Image (cartoon, helix red, strand yellow):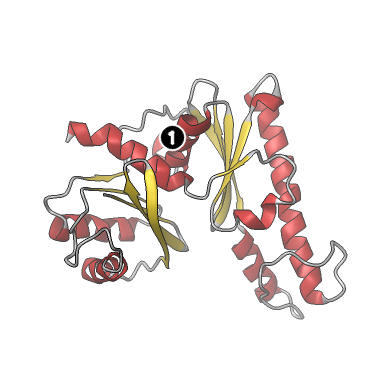
């Protein structure tokens, strides 16, 4: 079994692969204050319930692949792999790790590991040219060329950040549940805010993706647009440009990067 861990700014997603198939997954909050020992206890609690794994931490795990946008969490997870999974091959995505995707940006080291991993999975699953829209803490748009190169992207405030900002800065507004309202024209404040979030972000996606596609390919229709991230389902039904929805895109990319690096270890 391969354990994949995608550490985002808000949530951490874990996936368990049996070959190419993801057989289990978990989502937990990202907490930069957790120590390696606390993370190990958390992993044991989650995986100890799975029938394909043993009772002891590490039983049934043959490999680990990790990417993280929070450096302090990556540091603690590195210690977890050393102390609790010492005999298990582990790939932590950082500079020097082979991904198979050239990064054609001004400073490749500043591109988030999760964005590169998404590009790896997009190329493998759909080929290029492609655009990955990841609905996380930030909404990111990442462009992959026809030759499978990461050529750059767009970063915009995410859905949850926008909701929180409205609640904090609006004197008569409050934090709301992110849900699809009855109609675009809200009949009350909550529905009006929900409409602004859902349809506003759908419009943002359509506008940004359309412009990116025109730069990325001679024929924009040749560009495959893939949505991922926890809040993607909120926008899927309202966007006109999304072709594919792959909720486990980052975990799939981690599996691919693990396979490309483990033979070198």
* Residue extending furthest toward the left: 87
232 in relation to 151, above or below: below
Residue 190 placed where, x, y %?
A: 77, 75
Q: Nearer the viewer, residue 201 or 84?
A: 84
- In the picture provided, is 148 more to the left or to the right than 192? left
Query: Could you say whether the residue bearing mark 1 is in a helix, strand or loop?
Result: helix
Residue 90 placed where, x, y %?
A: 22, 46
- In the picture provided, is 76 more to the left or to the right than 206? left
* Residue extending furthest toward the bottom: 172
- In the picture provided, is 35 more to the left or to the right than 116? left
Q: Quadrant of the C terminus?
A: top left
Residue 199, by quadrant, is bottom right
**What residue does disc 1 label?**
120
Q: Say which residue appears at 30% left-offset and 68% top-offset.
A: 49
Q: Is residue 48 visible to us here? A: yes
55 in relation to 253, above or below: below
Using a 10 Å C-alpha cutoff, classify the residue at mark 1 as few (fewer than 14 neighbours), some (14 to 19) or many (20 or more): many
Residue 221 placed where, x, y %?
A: 70, 26
Q: Say which residue appears at 68% left-offset and 38% top-offset.
A: 209
Q: Say which residue appears at 27% left-offset and 58% top-offset.
A: 52
Q: Report the label total.
A: 1
184 in relation to 228, above or below: below
Q: Is residue 97 visible to us here? A: no
Residue 108, by quadrant, is top left
* Residue extending furthest toward the front: 51
Residue 243, by quadrant, is top right
């Amino acid at each position: 079994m391969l354990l994949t861990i995608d550490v985002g700014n808000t949530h951490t997603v874990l996936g368990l692969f049996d070959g190419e198939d993801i057989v289990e997954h978990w989502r937990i909050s990202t907490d930069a204050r957790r120590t390696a020992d606390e993370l190990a206890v958390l992993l044991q609690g989650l995986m100890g319930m799975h029938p394909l794994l043993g009772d002891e931490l590490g039983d049934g795990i043959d490999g680990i692949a990790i990417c993280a946008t929070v450096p302090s969490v990556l540091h603690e997870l590195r210690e977890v792999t050393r102390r609790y999974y010492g005999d298990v091959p582990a790939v932590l995505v950082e500079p020097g790790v082979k991904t198979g995707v050239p990064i054609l940006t001004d400073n490749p080291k500043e591109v988030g590991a999760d964005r590169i991993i998404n590009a790896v999975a997009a190329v493998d699953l759909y080929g290029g040219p492609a655009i990955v829209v990841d609905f996380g803490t930030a909404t990111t748009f990442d462009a992959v060329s026809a030759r499978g190169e990461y050529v750059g992207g767009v970063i915009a405030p995410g859905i949850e950040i926008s909701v929180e900002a409205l609640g904090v800065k609006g004197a008569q507004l409050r934090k709301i549940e992110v849900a699809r309202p009855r109609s675009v024209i809200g009949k009350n404040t909550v529905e009006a805010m929900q409409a602004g979030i859902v349809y506003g972000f759908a419009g943002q996606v359509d506008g940004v993706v359309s412009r990116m596609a025109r730069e990325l390919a001679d024929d924009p229709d040749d560009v495959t647009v893939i949505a991922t991230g926890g809040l993607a389902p909120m926008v899927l039904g309202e966007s006109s440009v999304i072709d594919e929805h792959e909720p486990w895109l980052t975990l799939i990319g981690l599996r691919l990067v693990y396979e490309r690096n483990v033979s070198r270890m």
